[in-house]
């Protein structure tokens, strides 16, 4: 099956700092989504981005499908950004998402 | 438009009991997916259903687990004779027919087996 790797596995930031999270996948995909799992365990949809660039407030994402990676940018980080960020991909024909192992982010004051 | 709803949010069962987890998809969505997150692990696909049909159950354990999505009512994930290793967060997601494939997740049910 398709492999999804995320880096870095852990990240600690001071409030106000910027960061880039990376997602590499091993095959072509039809669907790529980024999620934030907050400290209460809820999964929040951030982006549906199989290709191209999108922005939503302090967050933006870019997927380069031909090179099989996606990046999530967080600017001016806040403590509420803490949690785990997951990338998930779907190859097509089956609709099931394959999740990466996540990046654990902690934003400190 | 209400999001994906799951209940209960927390469920405690003793070993050997049955667990029933419910998922109501977003309005207008006819595709339902179940995922499991074991402690300290990522999310793993379990099953994909449409109304009255199981489309893909390749991630379901072979025994004790079953899922349904009836014509009327919520999707149900049923775990018979639960064991401690079933303790996990179970997430449901939904997507619309004819959409781009984006899946929207519910808040999850946290199952604890004592």
Image (cartoon, rainbow, N blue to C red):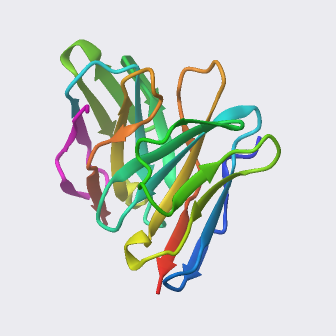
Q: Residue A76: tell me if it is visible.
A: no
Establish if B67 lies above or below A64. below
What secondary structure is the stretch in magenta mostly built from?
strand
Q: Position of residue B15 (x, y in %)?
A: 48, 84
Q: Residue at x 44, y 56 (%)?
A: B36
Q: Residue at x 43, y 59 (%)?
A: A80
Q: Nearer the viewer, residue A37 or A105?
A: A37
Return the residue found at the far top.
A66
Q: Nearer the viewer, residue B56 or A60?
A: B56
Q: Which residues are magenta?
A: A1-23
Q: Nearer the viewer, residue B45 or A86?
A: B45
Q: Quadrant of the N terminus of chain B?
A: top right
Return the residue found at the far front.
B63
Q: Position of residue B60 (x, y in %)?
A: 44, 51
Establish if A38 lies above or below A17. below
Establish if A50 lies above or below A7. above
Answer left or right for A54 relative to B110: left
Is residue B30 highlighted in magenta?
no
Answer left or right for B11 relative to B45: right
Q: Residue at x 45, y 21 (%)?
A: A93
């Amino acid at each position: 099956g398709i492999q999804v790797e995320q880096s870095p596995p852990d990240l600690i930031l001071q409030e106000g700092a910027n960061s880039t999270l990376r997602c590499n996948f091993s095959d072509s995909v039809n669907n790529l989504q980024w999620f934030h799992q907050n400290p209460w365990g809820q999964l929040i949809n951030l982006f549906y981005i199989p290709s191209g660039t999108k922005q939503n407030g302090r967050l933006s994402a870019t997927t380069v499908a031909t090179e099989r990676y996606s990046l999530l940018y967080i600017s001016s980080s806040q403590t509420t950004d803490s949690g785990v960020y997951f990338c998930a991909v779907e190859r097509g024909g089956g609709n099931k998402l394959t999740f990466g192992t996540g990046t654990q982010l902690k934003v400190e004051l | 438009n209400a999001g994906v709803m799951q209940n209960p949010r927390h469920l405690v069962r003793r070993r050997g009991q049955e667990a029933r987890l419910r998922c109501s998809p977003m309005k207008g969505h006819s595709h339902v997916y179940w995922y499991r997150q074991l402690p300290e692990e990522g999310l793993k696909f379990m099953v994909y259903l449409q109304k009255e049909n199981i489309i893909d159950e390749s991630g379901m354990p072979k025994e004790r687990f079953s899922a349904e999505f009836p014509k009327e009512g919520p999707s149900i994930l049923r775990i018979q004779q639960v064991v401690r290793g079933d303790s996990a967060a179970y997430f449901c997601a939904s997507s619309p027919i004819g959409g781009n494939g984006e899946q929207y997740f519910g808040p999850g049910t946290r199952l604890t087996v004592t």
